[in-house]
Image (cartoon, rainbow, N blue to C red):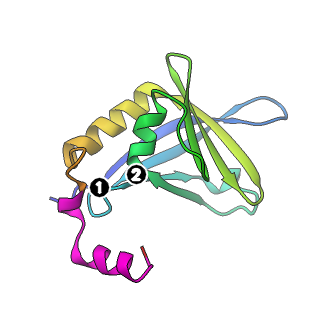
Amino acid sequence: MNTVIDQAVQVRLIATTSGPHAVPAVLHYQPADPLAVRMFFPPEISLDGSAVEWAFARELLDEGLRVPAGRGDVRIRPSGPDRTVMEFHAEEGVAMVQLRTADVRHFLARSYEAVPAGGESAHLGMDYGLAELFGAA
């Protein structure tokens, strides 16, 4: 079973000017790439007017609901009992968004139904192994 899990979420873009504003985004998970979560943002929030996609570890998203997590391009931390903050670091700067923790928990629960924690290796195919071996993964 190769179920793709998409969940629309409302994020609040945290900006230094004119306060935060709501933006639609999509959390995406597919068992064919069991270690990763992707988050898609609409073109209107990017600097160059193109759609934005970030990929990061599902485990990072899970950990970030409880404690600050991540040291690289994506960092996630709780913000009170009902919100989660995600930071996306790029050459151009840092984007911060805030979303409902309940939405993230629901998304993660669906992803763990599809591929239980610790069971990711059963979903990694030969192609992934070869790509990883040759540095393309």
Q: Secondary structure at mark 1?
A: loop
| Quarter residue 31 falls in | bottom left
Residue tagged 1: 4
Q: Position of residue 129 (x, y in %)?
A: 29, 75
- Quarter of the image where the C terminus is located: bottom left
Chief SS of the magenta region: helix
Q: Position of residue 32 (x, y in %)?
A: 27, 64
84 and 35: which one is in front? 35
Q: Residue furthest right?
A: 17
- Quarter of the image where the N terminus is located: bottom left
Residue at left offset 69%, top offset 33%: 21
- 12 shown above or below 30: above
Q: Residue furthest left?
A: 1
- 40 shown above or below 22: below
Give left or right: position of 66 versus 125.
Answer: right
Residue at left offset 45%, top offset 43%: 60
Q: Which mark is residue 28?
A: 2
Q: Which residues are magenta?
A: 121-136
Say which label, 1 or 2, has the lower sequence index.
1
Q: Is the C-beta separation of discs 1 and 2 under 8 Å? A: yes
Amino acid type at image mark 2:
His
Residue at left offset 63%, top offset 37%: 97
